Image (cartoon, helix red, strand yellow):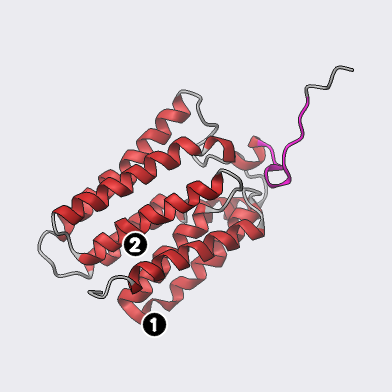
Amino acid sequence: MKRGCHSQRPSSLATTLDAVLKPSTRGEYLAYGISQVGSPPVMGLAGLTVVAASMAVPGVWLWSGVYVLMAMVAPLLFLIWQVRHGRVTDLDVQLREQRKGSLLVTIAGFGVSWLVMYVGHAPPLLKVMAGAGFVQWLIVFAITLRWKISVHTTSAAGVTLLILHVFGLAAAPLVISIPLIAWSRVKLRRHTLGQTVAGALLGCVVIVGAILLTPAL
């Protein structure tokens, strides 16, 4: 007997592209806004800017520029190229199977960024950010081969803990960003609750480990 050509989507991807890209309710519009503001590039750039501004170190903005160019701009340009050529569906890369290429470029960007900073004796905190990013995205890639983890909450948790480490309890209100971003991802049906929780835990573990392994901080 000939099998039908229709294949059922996994439950974690039980949504249509229209539902993802075209919110229809107030809650979905709110979630979409939070999801965009809390995206990994935005969170990463915001965290870098805040941390760099707190450091009275010569050349900190030059090194920050290196970090942005290699770890953020290069992967984003590659993702845009993928979308324009139909390699991935959208900039959010909602389908797990489409994430491999972008993740590999992101890993390479963080790795090169850390290497350049290490050789050039960049400020320790910036090296920690680049190194932690490399490890974090490497783990995300390994998980993505089998399961869809939330990189939004991974980034949110990592950036939040790093800022807490630098500014102490004064930055405590930022913690609310983690559950807010997690809610937005679940509301938009991009992730399950478990995937957002796993992402947040990964972000926490990586950044805490990086800080503990860097006595200079």
Residue 9, compared with residue 120, is above or below; it is: above
Q: Which quarter of the image is occupied by the C terminus?
A: bottom left
Q: In this view of the protein, can residue 123 be seen by the observer?
A: yes
Q: Position of residue 205 (x, y in %)?
A: 46, 67
According to the image, label 2 marks what residue?
47
Q: Main secondary structure of the magenta part?
A: loop
Q: Residue furthest left?
A: 58
The picture quadrant where one finds residue 172 is bottom left
Q: Gap between marks 1 and 2, in whole Å?
A: 16 Å
Which residue does the image show at 26% across and 53% down from the upper left?
114
Is 78 left or right of 178, judged from the image as shown?
A: left
Q: Which stretch did the figure color magenta?
A: 6-16
The residue lying at 38 percent from left, 44 percent from top is 106
**Magenta segment: does it hold 14?**
yes
Q: Which mark is residue 169?
A: 1
Q: Is residue 10 above or below residue 137?
A: above
Q: Quadrant of the N terminus?
A: top right
Percent coordinates x, y for residue 144 in the rendering: 55, 46
The answer to if 52 sits in the magenta stretch is no
Q: Amino acid at mark 2?
A: Gly
Q: Is residue 2 above or below residue 179?
A: above
Kind of residue at badge 1:
Leu
